[in-house]
Image (cartoon, rainbow, N blue to C red):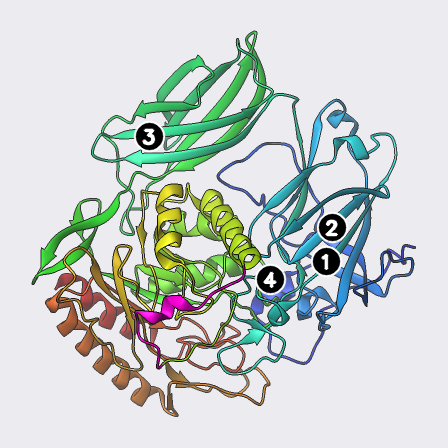
């Protein structure tokens, strides 16, 4: 049963909001194309008002809905228009109608989801279409056989999300927010969209650059390819074609980029790429993408400690811990401009890196990092047991066991994350585990990551239970930075994965919650600034000793955690922006 489509949506009031909340409309939320590195011309955005219902988990269907929800904002968020908690004993249901354009007749119709947390089941016109498990990465279904071109179609979705009542990957979500754990996110939280593709189409591309050879390797997957089909590849430098290449279908193509311009934070240069699939001189399918020529590796030593190099040169990487939470949208930024702001302001502060903490962002976030020019250390969202006994030694930490089905869930999402984000030049490090949260079989996980991607570095365990594998030895220490014990480690870089945590509560810009958390609390901006300067002075001494990277906690406050350089609503910067940039810039010349 549909509700009145004249329903007037508005955010649920009661908490602080960002300035972008006023730009959210119910008829066109997050209208941007959701997949910038694999772009086709035709698509249809299904974001907007859907019917919703919350029902007991064991109910098999829903016939009456509770109201309207604004997709893609999670049901717990203010911008969803609902802001209700979803219990592990309940399911969240979505429903809407859609019509397929006549021009899409004889096409394969794909239904795409950017991300839905956690177990998603879809019916099209009362026919079961598929089920997906995982909360952070994209998935899609071929719905061609279930739809009707000449009339409206019905889509029904159920979502079950156990949050912290089970052991699936969930990051910092909890059913009881407070301190360093935040409000749960359930249901659809990224763009939902339809895409028509021909019977023969390009399924995926994997782009690998080699700056030493000046080469781009393209791994191509196509569906229903014919032996006589042709692939045409065009590379553009500022709209000027510099490479034009055509051949029969192969899974791999290697292209030389003449006098290649390298991508870096100081020069985030991107080449545009067009792939065209042809048959009998007619275009069947066409995809647009982009790439950046860059290289990340372990290089020479500094004071006996292995260094991280970007494009064959030492570059100290200094970043912020970025939780990716919003007071109005939770996991979902209110607008694309808002998502871009967090990256831009981080760079304006003088940082050249972001550690994306136990969350995977929508594809557009990484696109902005690629365009703006900031390095990304990408965490795998953690699940399993989030609290470990800190009296454990590094050696026996690996004895924590997860059930086989939990491990498979982890591996499924890990592989999906790496395959989804592989082409982004800004991502330079994978971080499979944070502080022992759900950590298991670390050496095997590192081997799996290398199998999926041998072009980036691996920080095997950020913070606590290092297992002696990967490329990085990582230490967390608050508030002052502390050098990892690296003396006996010849082949890994030394990194401070977290430090800082200097807190300042700003009236009228703080989330209303009883449980607050800071590592060190300040009441005056001048004293906060002075302490930050002292931490940077300590950090300089460690860089001279051979430290390769450091990550400050954190870019924004999040709910009850007040360690941000900016308030949760992004309206107040706690340390003068120019002064902060001046302080941070001194780290790169040591």
Query: Mark 4 or mark 2, which is nearer to you?
Result: 2
**Which of marks 2 and 1 precedes in the sequence?**
2
- The vertical placement of 528 against 133, above or below, is below
Query: Mark 3 or mark 2, which is nearer to you?
Result: 2
Q: Residue at horizontal 29%, vertical 64%? A: 350
- For the residue pair 279 and 367, the one nearer the viewer reads as 279
**Which of marks 3 and 4 precedes in the sequence?**
3
Q: Quadrant of the N terminus?
A: bottom right
**What separation in Å lies between label 1 and label 2 (alpha carbons)?**
7 Å
Residue 400 among magenta residues:
yes
Q: Which residue is mark 4?
A: 334
- For the residue pair 82 and 469, the one nearer the viewer reads as 469
**What separation in Å lies between label 3 and label 1 (alpha carbons)?**
40 Å
Quarter holding residue 173: bottom right
Residue 107 picture location, percent across and down = 71, 25
Q: Which mark is residue 121?
A: 2
Residue that protrudes farthest toward the bottom in the picture: 523
Residue 447 picture location, percent across and down = 35, 48
**Which of marks 2 and 3 precedes in the sequence?**
2
Query: Mark 3 or mark 1, which is nearer to you?
Result: 1
Is mark 1 in CB contact (under 8 Å) with mark 2?
yes
Q: Residue at horizontal 71%, vertical 61%? A: 160
Helix, strand, or loop for circle 1?
A: strand
- The vertical placement of 518 against 454, above or below, is below
Q: Main secondary structure of the magenta part?
A: loop
Q: Which residue is mark 1?
A: 159
- The vertical placement of 282 against 239, above or below, is above
Residue 89 among magenta residues:
no
């Amino acid at each position: 049963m549909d509700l009145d489509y004249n329903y007037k949506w508005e955010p649920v009031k009661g908490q602080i909001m960002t300035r972008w909340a006023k730009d959210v409309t119910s008829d066109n939320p997050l209208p941007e194309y959701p997949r910038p590195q694999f772009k086709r011309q035709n698509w249809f955005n299904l974001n907007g008002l859907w019917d919703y219902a919350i029902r007991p988990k064991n109910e098999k269907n829903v016939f009456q809905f509770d109201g309207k929800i604004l997709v893609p904002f999670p049901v717990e968020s203010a911008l969803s228009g609902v802001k209700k908690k979803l219990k592990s004993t309940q399911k969240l249901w979505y429903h809407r109608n859609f019509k397929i354009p006549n021009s899409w007749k004889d096409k394969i119709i794909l239904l795409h989801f950017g991300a839905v947390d956690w177990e998603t089941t879809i019916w099209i016109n009362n026919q079961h279409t598929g089920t997906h498990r995982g909360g952070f990465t994209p998935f899609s279904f071929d719905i061609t056989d279930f739809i009707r071109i000449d009339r409206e179609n019905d889509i029904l979705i159920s979502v079950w999300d156990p949050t912290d009542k089970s052991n699936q990957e969930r990051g910092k979500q909890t059913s009881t927010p407070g301190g360093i754990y935040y409000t749960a996110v359930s249901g659809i939280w990224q763009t939902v969209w339809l895409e028509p593709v021909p019977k023969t189409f390009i399924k995926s591309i994997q782009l690998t650059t080699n700056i030493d050879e000046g080469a781009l390797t393209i791994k191509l997957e196509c569906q229903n390819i014919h032996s006589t089909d042709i692939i045409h590849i065009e590379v553009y430098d500022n709209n000027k074609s510099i490479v034009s290449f055509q051949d029969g279908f192969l899974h791999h193509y290697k292209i030389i980029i003449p006098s290649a311009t390298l991508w870096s934070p100081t020069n985030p240069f991107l080449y545009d790429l067009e792939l065209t699939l042809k048959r009998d001189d007619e275009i069947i399918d066409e995809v647009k993408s982009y790439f950046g020529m860059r290289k990340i590796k372990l290089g020479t030593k500094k004071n006996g400690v292995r260094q991280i190099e970007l494009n064959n040169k030492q570059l100290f990487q200094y970043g912020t811990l970025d939780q990716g939470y919003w007071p109005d949208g939770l996991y979902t930024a209110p607008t694309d401009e808002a998502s871009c702001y967090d990256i831009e302001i981080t760079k304006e502060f003088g940082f050249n890196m972001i550690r994306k903490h136990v969350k995977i962002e929508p594809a557009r976030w990484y696109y902005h990092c690629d365009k703006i020019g900031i390095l990304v250390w990408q965490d795998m969202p953690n699940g399993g047991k989030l609290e470990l006994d800190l009296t454990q030694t590094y050696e026996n930490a690996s004895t924590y066991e997860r059930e086989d089905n939990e491990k498979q869930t982890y591996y499924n999402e890990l592989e999906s994350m790496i395959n989804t984000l592989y082409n982004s030049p800004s991502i330079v490090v994978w971080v499979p585990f944070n502080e022992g949260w759900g950590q298991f079989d670390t050496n095997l996980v590192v081997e799996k990551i290398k199998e999926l991607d041998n072009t980036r570095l691996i920080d095997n365990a950020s913070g606590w239970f290092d297992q002696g594998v990967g490329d990085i030895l990582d230490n967390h220490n608050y508030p002052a930075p502390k050098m990892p014990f690296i003396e006996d480690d010849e082949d890994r870089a030394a990194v401070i994965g977290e430090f800082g945590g200097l807190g300042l509560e700003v009236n009228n810009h703080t989330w209303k919650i009883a449980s607050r958390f800071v590592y060190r609390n300040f009441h005056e901006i001048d004293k906060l600034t002075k302490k930050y300067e002292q931490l940077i002075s300590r950090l300089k001494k460690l860089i001279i000793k051979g430290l390769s990277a450091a990550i400050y906690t954190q870019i924004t406050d999040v709910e009850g955690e007040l360690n941000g350089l900016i308030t949760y609503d992004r309206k107040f910067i706690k340390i003068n922006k120019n002064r902060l940039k001046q302080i941070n810039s001194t780290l790169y010349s040591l």
